[in-house]
Amino acid sequence: MGKTKTTKYDVAEHLRTPEEMAAYLEACMAEANGDATFIAKALGDIARAKGMAQVARQAGLSRESLYKALSGERIPTFDTILKVMEALDLRLHAEPVHA
């Protein structure tokens, strides 16, 4: 029997429309369970799909600092999150949690 060849899955390759990007972020926020680095990583996936250089420019950040902030290895400031969200044409919203 031959060897099975696998390739690394990159979600950024599948986020093509603003609607897909928003749905992905919503799903990640629902699954994050309070893990801010998980949300930062999801924003990083979306930024890579849109083009990291373009997002960094629109957010007023260097490309390197954007990569670091959205790597999932550190928690970015809320200010950075808001700048990135705006650059990605995404909006945060709140809704009540029903017990």
Image (tube, rainbow, N blue to C red):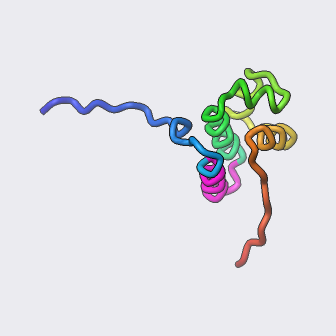
Q: Is residue 10 left or right of residue 17?
A: left
Residue 88: quarter of image: top right
The answer to if 57 sits in the magenta stretch is: no
The relative height of residue 74 versus residue 25 in the rendered view (above or below) is above
Q: Nearer the viewer, residue 32 or 86?
A: 86
**Nearer the observer, 85 or 19:** 19
Residue at screen point 79% across, 59% down: 93
Residue 53: % across, % down:
71, 24
Image coords of residue 20 (percent x, y): 59, 49
Residue 10 placement (x, y as % from top left): 50, 35
In the picture as drawn, the residue positioned furthest to the bottom comes out as 99
Residue at image position (67%, 35%) is 47
Quarter of the N terminus within the rendering: top left
In the displayed structure, 82 sits above or below 26; it is above
Query: Which image quadrant: the C terminus?
Result: bottom right
User: Can I make out residue 48 in this image?
Assistant: yes
Q: Residue at x 77, y 43 (%)?
A: 85
Q: Residue at x 70, y 54 (%)?
A: 34
The percent position of residue 37, horizontal first and vertical second, equals 69, 42
- Asked if residue 73 lies left or right of residue 20, the reply is right
* Magenta range: 21-35
43 relative to 78 in the view: left or right: left
**Does the magenta stretch mainly form a helix, a strand or a loop?**
helix
Total numbered labels placed on residues in the image: 0
Visible residue check, residue 72? no
